[in-house]
Amino acid sequence: MARPARETIRITVGWCNVENPTVTSDTEKRSPEGARPVYSIAEIMKFLPHRYPFLLVDKILEIEPDKRIVGLKNVTINEQFFQGHFPGAPVMPGVLIIESMAQVAGVLIYRDLPDKDKKLIYFSGIENAKFRRPVLPGDQLQVEMQLLSRRNNFGKMQGRATVDGKLVAEAVVLFAIVERPGS
């Protein structure tokens, strides 16, 4: 099967030429292999109801619909939680690592959810959460979530969070899809 031609965008700024800069669209972007969509922060915000300072996923790197998703959170010293956790020794709180996992999972669930504007996805449980290493300012938290089961408006996903390929946290998150209040 022939591979479709890739659209090339070239921007010249002074002496610098940039091909295919990070410009988001309303449609899914495909990786070079053409196999998986990738979402930018602007596209993620079309799926998730979360906003700063509680939006804890910056990019979706891989997705296999109804199976698995991989997201990225850039952890910076500017995060509000570092002011108090812990002064002089900043560490990302474990509960926010789990929340980042849930938000990455949420992108997978919301993307194909009918009437997504009228729905919210709530945590309904956390199982077997383990924290292996601290997450520090400057780290890139990579989150991989795999759908274990889903029945009607309930589901379960297994998650792993890594920094530089090293496991920092893992958990099973349970979710419930509910009607958004007022809709």
Image (tube, rainbow, N blue to C red):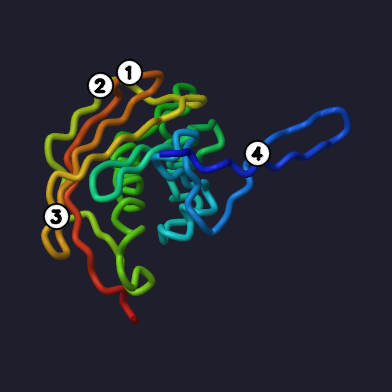
**Element class at badge 4:** loop
Q: Select label 4 or label 2 by which is in front.
A: 4
Is there a contact, CB below 8 Å, between mark 3 and mark 1? Answer: no
Look at 49% across and 23% down and name the residue there: 88
Give me the C-alpha separation between circle 4 and circle 3: 37 Å
**Element class at badge 2:** loop
Q: Is residue 176 left or right of residue 87?
A: left
**Element class at badge 1:** strand
Look at 24% across and 27% down and name the residue there: 131
Given the image, on which type of amino acid does mark 3 rest?
Answer: Arg
Q: Select label 2 or label 3 by which is in front.
A: 3
Residue situated furthest bottom in the rendering: 182
Question: Looking at this view, is 169 or 93 the one in front?
Answer: 169
Residue situated furthest right in the rendering: 14
Q: Is residue 183 left or right of residue 178?
A: right
Q: Which of the marked residues, 1 or 4, is nearer the chain's N terminus? A: 4
Label ID, residue 20: 4
